[in-house]
Image (cartoon, grey):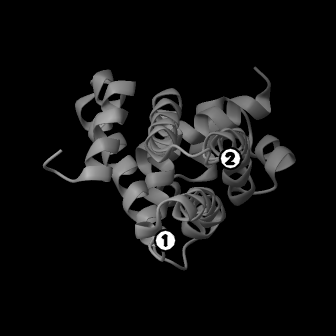
């Protein structure tokens, strides 16, 4: 692992456990076993470091999400695929997912909020696009795609948060994704 990769790895662990604002550059370089100039060489600043982490983790995920959220006429199957994609990503990148969940609720003017909003917006746009396409087939959905997007994302993130709490992998299994999607589609009496 290169020094750059080590810095990103240790920074992500620290940011996820202690919060971005609570971790200083000195703590990051001490954890990685390097000096401050090394961090500044690769990233210029702590902000540059968090942006590099976000880019490295989010871009491949957004590419995958774009593929599976392409609506092909089966809303339930598409929702299940999207939800399981998130579950798999959160399981494989738990420190990162914890970090982005925390950043979504940061103060609006904070650097953490600003750095992640672009990625949150892209996710929402992809999912809303899927709902807009589904509206063409399901007239009763018209005009509600934005609300569906936020509700569905809320359900995904609640499921992932529950997994972080229980540490039980069945809570983010494909079956769990199917059950949550049924609940989303048909309500609590399904």
Q: In the depicted view, which residue is nearer to us: 162 or 9?
A: 162
Would you call the spot at circle 1 few (<14 residues within 10 Å), some (14-19), or many (20 or more)? some
Residue 7: image location, x then y, percent: 69, 36
The span from disc 2 to disc 1 (Cα, nearest Å) is 17 Å
Q: In the depicted view, which residue is nearer to us: 114 or 68?
A: 68
- The residue under the point 13% across, 49% down is 189
Q: In the rendered image, which quarter contains the N terminus? A: top right
Q: Residue furthest top?
A: 1
Q: In the rendered image, which quarter contains the C terminus? A: top left
Would you call the spot at circle 2 few (<14 residues within 10 Å), some (14-19), or many (20 or more)? some
- The residue under the point 74% across, 48% down is 52
Write down the residue under mark 1: 146
Q: In the depicted view, which residue is nearer to us: 27 or 77?
A: 77
Compare marks 2 and 1 and give the one earlier in the sequence.
2
Q: Is residue 1 left or right of residue 117?
A: right
Residue 42: image location, x then y, percent: 84, 44
Q: In the depicted view, which residue is nearer to us: 111 or 98?
A: 98
Write down the residue under mark 2: 66
Look at the picture and state if 177 lies above or below 146: above
């Amino acid at each position: 692992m290169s020094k750059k990769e080590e810095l990103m790895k240790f920074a992500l662990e620290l940011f996820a456990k202690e919060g971005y604002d609570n971790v200083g550059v000195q703590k990051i370089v001490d954890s990685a076993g390097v000096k401050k100039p090394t961090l500044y060489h690769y990233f210029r600043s702590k902000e540059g470091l968090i942006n590099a982490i976000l880019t490295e983790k989010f871009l491949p995920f957004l590419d995958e999400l774009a593929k599976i959220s392409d609506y092909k006429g089966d809303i339930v199957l598409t929702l299940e695929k999207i939800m399981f994609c998130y579950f798999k990503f959160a399981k494989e990148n738990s420190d990162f997912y914890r970090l982005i969940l925390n950043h979504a609720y940061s103060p609006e003017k904070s650097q953490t909020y600003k750095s992640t909003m672009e990625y949150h917006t892209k996710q929402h746009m992809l999912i809303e696009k899927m709902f807009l396409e589904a509206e063409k087939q399901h007239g009763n959905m018209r005009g509600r795609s934005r609300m569906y997007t936020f509700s569905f994302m809320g359900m995904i993130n609640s499921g992932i948060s529950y997994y972080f709490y229980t540490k039980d992998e069945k809570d983010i299994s494909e079956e769990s994704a199917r059950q949550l999607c049924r609940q989303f589609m048909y309500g609590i009496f399904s």
